[in-house]
Structures are given as C-alpha cells and as structure tokens.
Image: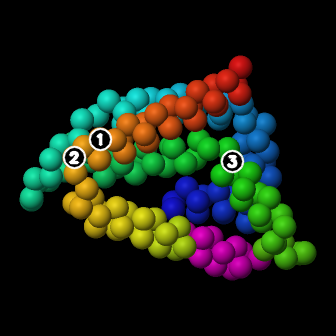
Amino acid sequence: AASDAVYSAIAALGLTRVSDFLLAHEVAFHLLAAIFLVGFGLKIYFTKAEPEVEGKECDSISIPYAFSSAMLMTLANPLTVMFFVTSFTVLAPPGGFQHLDCGVVVAGIFMGSCAWLSGVVGSVSYFRHAISIRVRELIDRVTGAALVLFGVSELVRFF
C-alpha cells in the first residue's frame, strides 16, 4: 500500500523527472526484479512448513524487514509505475491535479490498497488453520515455482 501511495504521488504530482528516470532505467529495474523474484521464489519453495503452535511468536521476521522487503518487491516492479502514470494520464483533470486534490487522490489510493490487502491477509489468516501442513507446503511449492518462473521470464526479457 505504501509503494502504491509513492507511485500514485509520483504520477499525480506529475514528477516527470522521477517517472522518466524510472522508465529510462526500466531494464535495470527488470533485472533487479528478476533477481529478487528468483531469490524470493527459491526461498519460499525450499522453506518447510511448520505445524501451527498456539501462542508462538513470529520472532524470525522483524516488522522493518517485512515492510522493507515488501516495499522493495513492489517498487522494483516497473509495471506498477507505468500503470499509475498511464492511469493518471487518462483520468487526471485537464489542468492537472491541484495540491489538495493530489493529496486526496494519493490518500484514497493508500486507503484502498490498505483495505484490499487487509482483506487478503485477513482471509488467509482465517483460513490457514483449515488446511493441512501438506496443503500449505504444496501452496508454497506452487507459489515459489511461479515466482521463479516470473523471475526467469524477466531475466530472459533482460537478455
């Protein structure tokens, strides 16, 4: 949600230098995204699912690490910035956004992303106890393999 807010602010404020920089270095962003996706996919693929332990604290991942890795993954996706730039080009008023309008639009995108992602995480958290460890491992394998394939396709596109 934070990265969506960053990109929507870039698009809404018309910071063409920033968006031009991102688009000019699209190849580097594709390479970084590919490396990140392959590494993240392999980590997910080879991680063993553990049985749920009631009251177990999740001390292996810190909040700053979780936030920064999610930000990096979404900011490294050049399709996101292209989506916001093209959407704002089509939807922006003829005179462009005023500062207050821009703030309202960015806040709305941030709140909408937060609502959507909260629903997704809440649903997964609610239903994760209903599936067995074998099914969770299968989901991890399929997800990890898909991320590796996306990363490899980005590498092929890079070369």
Q: Position of residue 119 (x, y in %)?
A: 42, 70
Q: Residue furthest right?
A: 94
Callout 3: 10 Å neighbours few (<14), some, many (20+)?
some
What are the residue bounds of the magenta stretch?
98-110
Give the residue type that dot 3 points to: Leu
In which quadrant is the C terminus drawn?
Answer: top right
Q: Is residue 105 magenta?
A: yes
Q: Is residue 138 left or right of residue 9?
A: left
Element carrying mark 2: helix
Q: Position of residue 62 (x, y in %)?
A: 27, 47
Compute the Cα span from label 3 to label 1: 29 Å
Question: In this figure, which residue is indicated by the disc labeled 3?
Answer: 79
- The residue under the point 22% across, 46% down is 133
Callout 2: 10 Å neighbours few (<14), some, many (20+)?
some
The numbered mark at residue 61 is none
Of labels 3 and 1, earlier in sequence is 3
- The residue under the point 53% across, 28% down is 35
Give the residue type that dot 2 points to: Ile
Q: Is residue 8 left or right of residue 49?
A: right
Q: Position of residue 49 (x, y in %)?
A: 23, 41
The numbered mark at residue 137 is 1
Compute the Cα span from label 1 to label 2: 6 Å
Q: Nearer the viewer, mark 2 or mark 3?
A: 2
Question: In this figure, which residue is indicated by the disc labeled 2?
Answer: 133
Q: Nearer the viewer, mark 3 or mark 1?
A: 1
